[in-house]
Image (cartoon, rainbow, N blue to C red):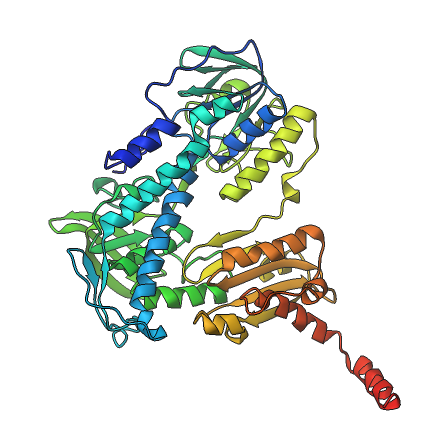
Amino acid sequence: MNTKSDNPPLTPWDSHNQRLVSNVHPSDWNNPTPAPRYNLVVIGAGTAGLVTAVGAAGLSAKVALIEKRLMGGDCLNVGCVPSKAIIRSARAAAAVRDAGEFGVHLSSPAGSSTTLAPSDGEREGVRGNGAGVSVDFAKVMERMRRLRAGISPHDSARRFTELGVDVFLGAGRFTGPDTVEVGGQSLRFAKAVIATGVHAAAPPIPGLDQVPYLTNETLFSLTELPRRFGIIGAGPIGCEMAQSFARFGSEVYLVEATHGILPREDQEAAAIVRGAMERDGVRLLCCGKNVSVTKDPGGIRLKAESHGKGYDLVVDQLLVAAGRAPNVEELGLETVGVEFDKKGVKVNDRLQTTNHRIYACGDICSPYQFTHAADFMARIVIQNALFKGRAKVSSLIIPWSTYTSPEIAHVGLYEREAKEQGIEVDTYTQEMSKVDRAILDDETAGFVRVHVRKGTDDIVGATVVAAHAGDLIGELTLAMKGGLGLKTIGATIHPYPTQAEAIRKTGDLYNRTRLTPFVKKLMTHWLAWTR
């Protein structure tokens, strides 16, 4: 399952996957006759390519869109969409498991499915409610496939054709200074865009090439829950899936080379998520060294050292969630003077490659490999490629979120980054444990942390770790984009009770710092005089 093919495996071949493919790579598709010349030829129909193509066509440009795999790219097929469907089912399982804490008790489960062990609260801190939780993993995955297929018409070949885009299914390759070949046809362009994205790439682990392993491109074809699940890499994908599969009932071992999890994030925030994952049953082997895998009669043997202790485990499935590589193969980039390296295509701040007629956007050229980042990079490309714009990718304020429970979301600079850039900051932290709605929801783990330029309320970065951090970070992102400071946030009425009050309370923390001893003394004298 570790061989990269033109299309990710879509099994089982049920009605949902058949519907998906009929939309995003229909077998009966006939490529159109090329126009004499296109304003824009876009290679790659993931988020970046789709937004570029439809946005340009909506402005009356003549656009060709080329895709050799599945339209919708990673996000629809093997990324955001299927993973979040699985996470939602896992959260439902956790909610049922913990229902007793809210005074809700369940009858005994019926039917043939995985049942989580009852009352694990006294064993290694794993939470339990005394009632068995039945998880039908096959149903979880069927729901995911059904929802993914239901979303797929938005990214379909037919829809984009109806919107005025010439859709070509096949491998695109630059063949000249203004030509791209696909399916034996030559397309001439004024400008072109590379939006081919990235694919999973495994790290150099001894024995990995000798065992079957999963990546994000194959994980979502599982139909049976692994009893023992090994995961290598504690980044966003590894953590999200480790927690989800543990909640389904898998015995999960998460291996990470660095200390803790989510090494990029605020480490206090990551520690909170780590504690939640371990309470859900995830076994973390961090600071992992000497990792190796071999075949075993019982599955896959995984060996690793963690904090001086050796582990020798046998797992049923292994997910490699570390490493990504750009899709630059067979594009003919050398033919047109487009420079690239192992990180992807090289671009300037206006997303122009080393060939001034060719642009790139999305994961193929960005350190921010998020769907929403690709979306807004595409908007920059439309301005610059079609209208000689000067829009800069460095002007984007890009938030992101990891959808564990609790979630971690971030925007702007971390405190360590501010120090590296010589920016002095004041930091305001509001604990969720002091927010009424979080208390009532029993979701008190976490905080809102905002960094402002020292002596001002100008926000330079923020981290939220909370049950709904991905939703909450939008307010802080808007404030940064609009130049609104913590003073304004503190003066903005929020409905009560909501967890978003935590953000307003950071504004209150800032406002309290403005009450200096001198100001307080003046106010005291004034109030005494006006009595």
Left or right of 105: which side holds 516?
Answer: right
Left or right of 321: which side holds 369?
Answer: right
* Residue at the (72%, 75%) spot, across then down: 513
**Where does residue 461 sit, x and y in percent of width and height?**
62, 58
Is the N terminus in the top left, top right, bottom left or bottom right quadrant? top left
Q: Which one is in front, 498 or 338?
A: 498
**Where does residue 70 sit, x and y in percent of width and height?**
38, 30
Q: Which one is in front, 340 or 499?
A: 499
Left or right of 101: which side holds 122?
Answer: left
**Where does residue 220 sit, x and y in percent of width and height?**
30, 43
Q: Which one is in front, 479 or 381?
A: 479
**Where does residue 213 sit, x and y in percent of width and height?**
25, 44
Relative to residue 25, is residue 317 depicted above or below? below
Q: Is residue 3 visible?
A: no
Q: Total number of numbered labels?
A: 0
Relative to residue 42, is residue 376 depicted above or below? below
Q: Residue furthest right?
A: 529
* Residue at the (25%, 72%) spot, across then down: 120
User: Looking at the rendering, which quadrant does residue 434 occupy?
Assistant: bottom right
* Residue at the (30%, 34%) spot, across then down: 17
* Residue at the (68%, 67%) spot, across then down: 490
Q: Is residue 244 visible?
A: yes
Relative to residue 394, is residue 246 depicted above or below? below
